[in-house]
Amino acid sequence: MGIIRILDEHIANQIAAGEVVERPASVVKELVENAIDAGSTKIDVSVEEGGLDSIRVTDNGAGIDPEDCETAFYRHATSKIAEGRDLFQITSLGFRGEALPSIAAVSKVRLVTSNAQDGRGRKIEIEGGHLRVNEETAAPRGTDFLVKELFYNTPARLKYMKTIQTELGHISDYMYRLALSRPDIAFTLRHNGNSLLQTLGNGDALQVIAAVYGTQSAKAMLLFEAENMDYTLSGYISRPDYTRANRNGMSLIVNGRYIRNYGLMQAILRGYHTLLPINRFPLVVIQLSMHPSLIDVNVHPSKLEVRFSKEQELFAFVEEEVRKVLQQEILIPRPAKQN
Ligand code: ADP
Ligand code: MG
């Protein structure tokens, strides 16, 4: 008799949760990405005690159809891709259908959502993966997600959480990057009632840079725009005399997705050439758009890492364009400060 069996959905979700939901910031990231994918123009995030007590994400996006509300919490349930070849043409932030079941497996979730304009919506409550409530409720169009007591049923994971300040640091880090990646969306972040971030959503990337890094930093930025057959680049890079001690201020956004890519970062730094002091790094917020077939985002569950199909061409292009912008800046010195 064989001894291999297929794990039931509940255990599978708990296993997946270990990978998808590393800490409160992962929940924030997944919920906000869902809100973005739903076409929201306003996304409010409110967390208590570093997100360990509660995380609430409210959006004004498309909402979820009442019939889909329960299904959304099943594994591999997604409205974003339908067939294999869609994997090579991904335009949404999510597509794996893993976030909601994973989050719901390790917390107490309340979802209130409506995809209609008539004030009618749906409420779902799930505790540790078990459905408790699925009923009609009054709700404005959009989605309101509340996640309480994260890891309450996985004490080992809970014990591993760092201080509230550290967890909050990870959350604000994600929120900053998401806000930088989407200047067309109005974001707010609150912690224990205090406002930590507010962007206007008017499409002005410089406003978001000012909201995240302060107005002084925003003043040090140079407009960065370029285009070739495959790629469109836009954003801001800091003047070489404005530097930081690490690379954390270098944000790369590809097709609206914040990514990490060492090669691309190096290309930017090569563009600065000898203009940067040793061990100093620029502030960079660059949006890069390309046809979805030129990038593979299905490399890692966090989707932070991507592969470019024409890597060398892309890096050379970016390096060259950074150099051009800086050369212009040096050749045309900015006006002396008025006293
Ligand atoms: P994925 O984002 O990979 O599709 P998720 O588990 O994160 O998987 O979400 C499952 C589905 O639930 C999504 O495909 C989407 O249809 C729906 N959904 C989740 N959050 C929202 C939201 N804020 N607004 C509208 N639909 C949502
Ligand atoms: Mg998702």
Image: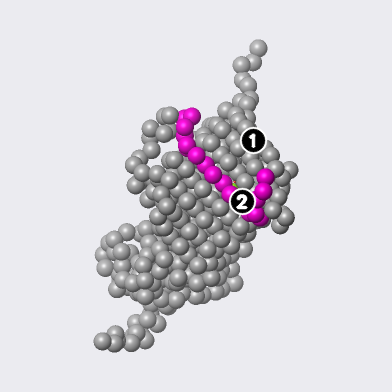
In the image, residue 231 lies in the stretch drawn in magenta: no
> Are circles 2 and 1 on residues that touch, CB within 8 Å?
no
Indicate which label's residue lies in the foreground, 2 or 1. Answer: 1
Residue at disc 2, secondary structure: strand
| Disc sitting over residue 143 in the figure | 2
**Residue 125, how many percent across, how many down?**
60, 37
Describe residue 318's horizontal placement relative to residue 4 as left or right. Answer: left
Quarter location, residue 99:
top right
Q: Nearer the viewer, residue 150 or 101?
A: 150
Amino acid type shown at disc 1: Val
| Disc sitting over residue 133 in the figure | 1
**Residue 224, how many percent across, how many down?**
46, 74
Alpha carbons under labels 2 and 1: distance apart: 16 Å
Q: Is residue 306 visible?
A: no
Badge 1 local density, few (<14 within 10 Å), some, or many (20+)?
some
Label 1 residue near ligand 1, CB within 8 Å: no
> Among all residues in the image, which is located at the extreme top?
1
Specify start and end residues of the magenta stretch as a single range.
137-154
Could you tell me which residue is drawn at 60 percent across and 30 percent down? 130
Amino acid type shown at disc 2: Thr
Image height check: is 18 above or below 289? above
Label 2 residue near ligand 1, CB within 8 Å: yes
Quarter location, residue 289:
bottom right
